[in-house]
Image (spheres, rainbow, N blue to C red):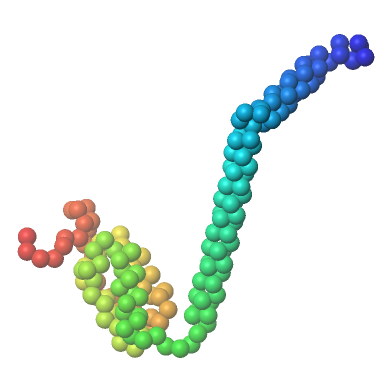
Amino acid sequence: MHERSASNPLGTLCNVALAFAAGALMMYFLDPNTGRRRRALVRDRGVSVSRDAERLVRGKSKRAADRLKGLAARTRANLSSTPIDDDMLHDRIRSRLGRLVGHPHQVEVHVHDGWVQLKGTVAEEEFEDLLHAVSSIRGVRNLESLLRTASSQSGGVAAPGPH
């Protein structure tokens, strides 16, 4: 036994430190004055962490289920052959314009039987993306662009109205 401790003094030191820490922990939690409160705090924190983890998992699974529902709805919509109402198509295009161009109020949208006509002014950088995005909206059968492009080097497309 003497040879073993002499050959590995670090292991013996770790064992003594571990035994000391275990004893201190037992004294901490089994203290007659405040041990009950300390044990209750540890229990309450454990319950709180488990509830937080449950809430996190429930939220992640709900988001995943919602994404799958959205994917299924988009797939059904893409496979559907029912025509889209012109007013609905107009609203979809106006909604998309707000995310594509800096000044969506400067673009007029006219829709008739899936034929879309765009009039107004857009920045040069936005022109190609706008045409691609509008033509890819479900229900657009034809896209006619009467748009003018303006250079955005002079601070962007000017807002309409008196100067």
The quarter holding residue 8 reads top right
Residue at screen point 42% across, 88% down? 83
Q: Is residue 133 above or below residue 23?
A: below
User: In this image, 137 relative to 149: left or right?
Assistant: right
Q: Is residue 148 visible?
A: no
Image position, residue 58 (x, y; %): 58, 59
Between residues 71 and 138, which one lies in front from this camera angle?
A: 71
User: In this image, 44 relative to 96: left or right?
Assistant: right
Residue at screen point 61% across, 34% down? 38
Residue extending farthest left? 162
How many labels were placed on the picture?
0
The quarter holding residue 10 reads top right
Image position, residue 20 (x, y; %): 73, 21
Image position, residue 109 (x, y; %): 26, 77
Residue at screen point 6% across, 60% down? 163
Image position, residue 43 (x, y; %): 63, 42
Quadrant location of the N terminus? top right
Between residues 69 and 10, which one lies in front from this camera angle?
A: 10
Q: Is residue 57 above or below residue 110?
A: above
Between residues 23 and 160, which one lies in front from this camera angle?
A: 23
Residue at screen point 57% across, 67% down? 65
User: In this image, 142 relative to 30: left or right?
Assistant: left
Q: Is residue 64 visible?
A: yes
